[in-house]
Amino acid sequence: MKSAARKAEVRRIVSGSIYTAVEVVSGGGGRALGLAYVEGEGCRGRGAGGVEGGRCRRRGTLTVDGEPALPASAKDLLADFVEISEIKEGEGKGAEATVSTALASALAQLTLTEWETGDVLEQISVVEGERVTVVGGFPFTPRLKEMGAELSVFDRGFGDFDKVEMGTALEEADVVIVTGATITNGTLPDVLEKVGGAREVIILGPTTPLISAAFADTSVTRLMGVIPTDIEGVIEVVASGGGTRAFSRYVEKVSVSVGR
């Protein structure tokens, strides 16, 4: 990621009410767009966690204090914001964490050469009776039940839940699926700390930066995010306050493996 940042420029930072998008251009002219979920208040029900964000609206939009003059050096701008590895819950770095994550995701796309495509349930197999723990709100959870999984779902968008119960479910799970929004809200380190011997630990969603090296020393086995195929289309959706469903036609769902 740092090598990609050396000659790259940040051309646009688009702040919507659900996502922030950061566009970068490489020294060779390649373009990439990274996305990050905007953590906010007043978003409840289906869509929390950034999955069906088209139904969620925040009060106001994200602003970044001291917005930089653009274009700007990606390397310098990334240094000015918090690194994704430093994001922790409750540190008051919401805007910085969001921009940093989206920028890191865009830079990773500039150097990414290998990935798989398809939805999460097309890429993993769940055996009947396996324990699956999901952190975040995803529309595919009913299908996990149909596959015979013993399912536990914990989503802040549906209100408070028992953290002790979540810890037990994470420790006992065979498969763990975590929303990428936990990166920007700072809860991911605590979630991963509680994971036991799961055979699959997946970070999923548009916010997920496809940077295997950043998760090499964790229990994460796969990163499943998106690569925009129509940058202008995604930016238009983000700027108008749309979410994942609205820009789904403009992105490709991809995944990269993380070595343990």
Image (tube, helix red, strand yellow):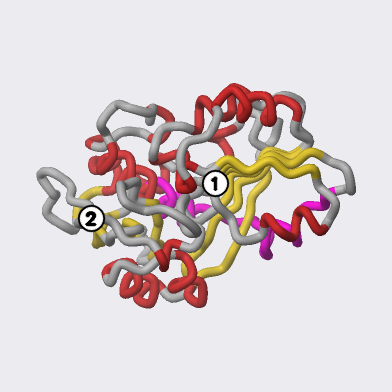
Q: Residue at x 38, y 61 (%)?
A: 56
Q: Residues within 10 Å of mark 1 (few under 14, many from 20)?
A: many
Vertical comparison of 161 with 99: above or below: above
Image location of residue 259, percent across then percent down: 69, 35
Image location of residue 57, percent across then percent down: 32, 61
On screen, residue 95 versus residue 48, left or right, reads left
Asked where in the image residue 177 lies, by quadrant, the reply is top right
Question: How far separated are the C-alphas under marks 1 and 2?
Answer: 21 Å
Q: Residue at x 44, y 73 (%)?
A: 246
* Of 142 and 39, the residue lying toward us: 142
N-terminal of the pair, mark 1 or mark 2, is 2
Q: Residue furthest right?
A: 128
Vertical comparison of 212 with 235: above or below: above
Image location of residue 134, percent across then percent down: 64, 43
Q: Is residue 61 magenta?
A: no
- Give the amino acid at mark 2: Arg
Asked where in the image residue 253 lies, by quadrant, the reply is bottom right
Tell me the element at label 2.
Answer: loop
- Give the amino acid at mark 1: Gly
Residue 225 — which label? none
Residue 136 — which label? 1
Q: Which quarter of the rendering shows the N terminus?
A: top left
Q: Residue at x 27, y 61 (%)?
A: 16
Q: Which residue is mark 2?
A: 59
Vertical comparison of 185 with 90: above or below: below
Tell me the element at label 1.
Answer: loop
Vertical comparison of 227 with 246: above or below: above
The reply to whether residue 257 is in sight is yes
Q: Which residues are magenta?
A: 104-126
On screen, residue 143 versus residue 57, left or right, reads right
Q: Is residue 117 magenta?
A: yes
Q: Residue at x 32, y 39 (%)?
A: 97
